[in-house]
Image: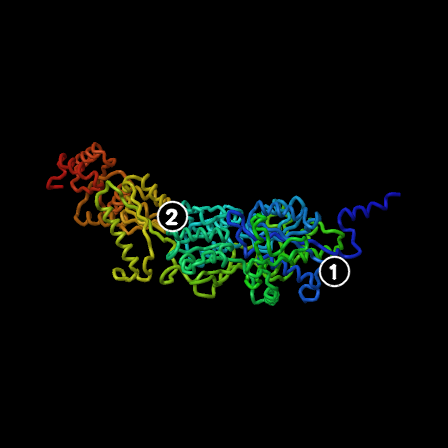
Amino acid sequence: MQQPLVVPLLLLSAGLAGASSALSSVRLCGLFPRFRTAAQDFKADDSGTRRFAAFVQAIREVNNKTDGIADHLLPTTEVLFTQRDSRRDGATAFFEARELATSAFKGQGCDAIVGAASSGPSALAALALKESSTPQVSYSSTSAGLSDGSTYPYFARTVPSDDFQATGLADLVHSLFGYKRIATVASTDAYGASGMLAFKRRASALGIVTLASVSITGGANDESDFSEQTEALRASGATVIVIFAGGYDASLFIEKAYDAGVGGPGFLWLGSDAVSQASTMARIEDPTVRRHVFQGFFGLTPSASTDSPIFRRYNRSRSAMPSTAGDGAGNCDLEIDDDGVQMWAADNDGNASTPLACSGSDNQQHDIYAMYSYDATFAFAHALHRLVEHARVAEVRGDELYEALVTNVSFEGVTGRIAFNDASADPSRRTHGDRTSGVRYDLWNFGQTELSVVGAWQPCSAGAAACSEISTSANFTYSTADNSKPHDGSEIGLLFAESGSGDGPKMAACAALLALQHVNEGNGSVVPELSWYGPNALQFVPKPIGIVRADVASAIRGYESIRDRIDGFVDGAASRTNVHVAQLGALDGVPQLSYYSSAPELSCDVQYTHFGRSYVSDKISSSVLAEQLAGYGWQHYGVLHVRDEWAVGYQEHLAQNAFRLGLTQFSGSWTESNAAEIREAVQMMRDIGVNIIVSLSFEVDLLPLLSSAEDEGLLADNF
């Protein structure tokens, strides 16, 4: 008799009872930064307010069934809304998100939440919302870490993941500007840390070398001390600096770096989307100081076409909204939302004795992320429509709403096609809820007074970040006086003997520095072919090391100390040293030119792929010497040589050439600086009886060699 009751009970437990009429209302809530924390003096967050205004705009358009904007969505269901201030603070966002999900609307809670703004607060909000299975769509949280669908199972976003913009920034460094060396600055929060990690992965794959990496803690203020970080940047010699941080923190850091000599003419800053905002630059009120600090800055922000009919409609609607900014005399707009919370004023400092602070908008200023907030609100409206009008649910359940959002929502928004990645079949749920279409970034450049769009970057297709397209449509403004592109510290290493080698190597090093001077004069007065470089095109990294001719370990240490800073290096090391150093250069892909190493072994282009020399190879000079010996009519000769890579290789090639010419060679050798072995080699030559002798020795052995030769009679007239 109880059997017929089973099916209805199961249907009700699934929330799909099929209501006879649509739900009369749904509850959509927002997390927006309206004011900062005490650490930043409770300052108003104007960009957060503009994003909240776009949220309100979208809800009112959904609720208005006669304005011609999405009148088909939720035709008989009202969207109720409220909001809380996330303050760009993780702990605040966590508790406010939990309060919205469980206590708002007299304990009914919110069906879904739009927000938060920054990645760190969004991550903690997502953890709080996980407990109640409340879906969340962020409009400006771009951290790649938020793509972890297993950790954040109810999180989605209308803004692209930083995996895209990190790839874009690296592509700009490599393909647009042609730089090879950079320094990096990242905030320690989720946004900066994960964004910089993604950037470095792409930069490394492109062969870009990071000379220095520094971190800054979020929540900076005017008293923050960045001296350690700026000194590290200065010491690195980097002139191209990539920064991934919040706009306010980045603005403070860039200004203080400029004061410390890191920035200004000859430098190029490249910033992530949070940095590349007008508000970042506007923090510096003096326009002259602002220009000195930011001129030549470049950055990326997610893009939206301002030519589309949807954008024009959105923009008209936004501009027509009445101002909520108050009267400017401290009298705020006191409108309240559907939960009884004031929308445009707040007790920003928690002090009941101080007046309310106004946090309204004049609705005339454009904010890139306000458009993403607008689209996030409409994304939930589409998902709710799916449940209310198609599934006819009796109540909104978070898991069903999130599934409808990810699997069924696809529409043309202000920022382009809105759709979300469904990775539910992937055990890791990586990128679940990430935006999958319409990914494009504007390239911004700060000129004399303001930021302007000068180009764009986009992946060839969504999800294919390794393939990209860069387009530019305007001239760039750089930080240099002549508006030439700053150099990235392109440097030529110079290894030279510090002591123990006489004056020759030092004179050669001076000649190399003189050549640098001639190149950097850029006028072709000495070498006309060098005039195309322009002034100050190159920089040497002089590195005095131990006796490079004899001390292999010191030469390797010297090379390793400059390897990551240089395009290539010039050296005066002996062959015995370079057979080791040149192998390291081959492994590291660092070109090397020697003006001293002549060993034939170094001509092996399989083993020494990046080695070259301006000094002639012994393979050639030994051939010439053999022909000279034969030309005199001599049949027998001896070679006295030190036992090292250079001399051994030379005498072997000399013997081969001599044999070809019918000559006979006898050899005696010694270990460098071993007077006893030198004497034994000379005595052996005396006993053989040859009187034509070739000497292959270094200056350090010359005196004992000649002394032994004199003692044994080898300096007589017939030798």
Residue sticking out furthest to the top: 676
Tell me: 145 left or right of 134.
left
Give percent across and percent down for residue 502.
21, 43
How packed is label 1: few (under 14 Cα within 10 Å), some, or many (20 or more)? Answer: some
Residue sticking out furthest to the right: 1
The residue depicted at 67 percent of the width and 45 percent of the height is 132
Q: Is residue 296 visible?
A: no
Amino acid identity at mark 2: Ser
Give percent across and percent down for residue 534.
33, 61
* Quadrant position of residue 582: top left
Give percent across and percent down for residue 486.
38, 57
The residue depicted at 71 percent of the width and 56 percent of the height is 386
Amino acid identity at mark 1: Thr
The image's mark for residue 236 is 2
Give percent across and percent down for residue 585.
37, 46
- Frontmost residue, 135 versus 67: 67
Residue sticking out furthest to the front: 353
* Disc 1, SS: loop
The residue depicted at 34 percent of the width and 57 percent of the height is 537
Check disc 1 and report the residue beneath it. Answer: 76
Above or below 549: residue 348: below
Quarter of the picture containing the C terminus is: top left
Tell me: 600 left or right of 7.
left
* Disc 2, SS: helix
Above or below 659: residue 29: below
Compute the Cα span from label 1 to label 2: 63 Å
How packed is label 2: few (under 14 Cα within 10 Å), some, or many (20 or more)? Answer: some
Tell me: 288 left or right of 340.
left
**Label 1 or label 2, whichever comes before in sequence order:** 1
